[in-house]
Amino acid sequence: MSQLARQNRALPRVPALAVLEYHLVGYRRTWRAGAFSSFLLPTLTVLGFGLGVGAYIDRGIGGVSYLEWIVGGLLASTALQVAIGESTWPVFGNLRWTKIYFAQGSTPLRVDDILAGHLAFVLFRVLTSIAAFLLVTGVLGALRSPWAVLALPVAALLTLAVAVPTFAYAAVVDSDSWLAMLFRFAVIPMTLFSGVFFPVESLPLVLRWIAYATPLWHAVDLCRAAVLGAAPHWSVAGHLCYLAAWAVGGWLLARRAFARKLVV
């Protein structure tokens, strides 16, 4: 049997699962390092803003306490930050420093397999973080509705909407300084002005429409509606289609960027 035949025989029926397994094995050794940023920090934010700042907001927002109102936004923003954190330096490093993608590309794995496998790991990271977040906020009594579990699929869709374009971005920049700029000029402003901490209706009209253009606001509206058991401001179908459009467009860009790097 030729070497290529043996490689093909060893490859699983879904080759992307081999890539996912690689990332999971590595994460088994490093999960403690990410526990603070993906779980403890959002939990402390809930306590600080929801209970601390919320104590000074007597009437709450929209008829609910500030703690209950802010949880949906923090769920979405946590998903955003974990997704982009796992899609910047890890992707850049696999291309520029450790060359892991090139090693994977030298096997029968295709570009689609490498990309899909790593994205599956990013989804795993986000969903485990959001599940733990839901558990803690449920214990704190901040979830008004059992529909809060729908924040998980919303977080998954938001992850694809922001992670896949970030994969493409990390694959084309020539310095990791550009990754820091992404956080400084995109992630932080998006987190502050997309309805996480206060209603976007309080913003000037121009900034309000900029907030509406971000994928985070759509996820915030859906997560908040799920947590509160209320209808979102915009239609559910509109939110989902908008996030899906970001994911599809990002996939096309990422696949093209990865193909240029890995296919000789």
Image (cartoon, rainbow, N blue to C red):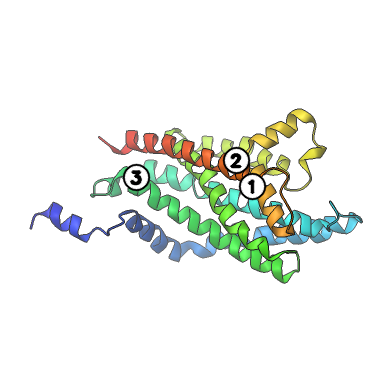
Of callouts 1 and 3, which one flags the residue occurring earlier in the amino acid sequence? 3
Q: Is residue 105 left or right of residue 241?
A: left
Of callouts 2 and 3, which one flags the residue occurring earlier in the amino acid sequence? 3
Q: Which residue is mark 2?
A: 183
Foreground disc of the pair 2, 1: 1
Number of the label disc, if any, that sits on residue 236: 1
Tell how many labels: 3
Q: Quadrant of the C terminus?
A: top left
User: Picture quarter containing residue 36?
Assistant: bottom right
Q: Is residue 121 left or right of residue 238?
A: left
Residue 15 placed where, x, y %?
A: 30, 54
Q: CA distance from mark 1 to mark 3?
A: 30 Å
Of callouts 2 and 1, which one flags the residue occurring earlier in the amino acid sequence? 2
Amino acid on which the number 3 mark rests in the picture:
Asp
Can residue 77 be seen by looking at this rendering? yes
Q: Which residue is mark 3?
A: 112
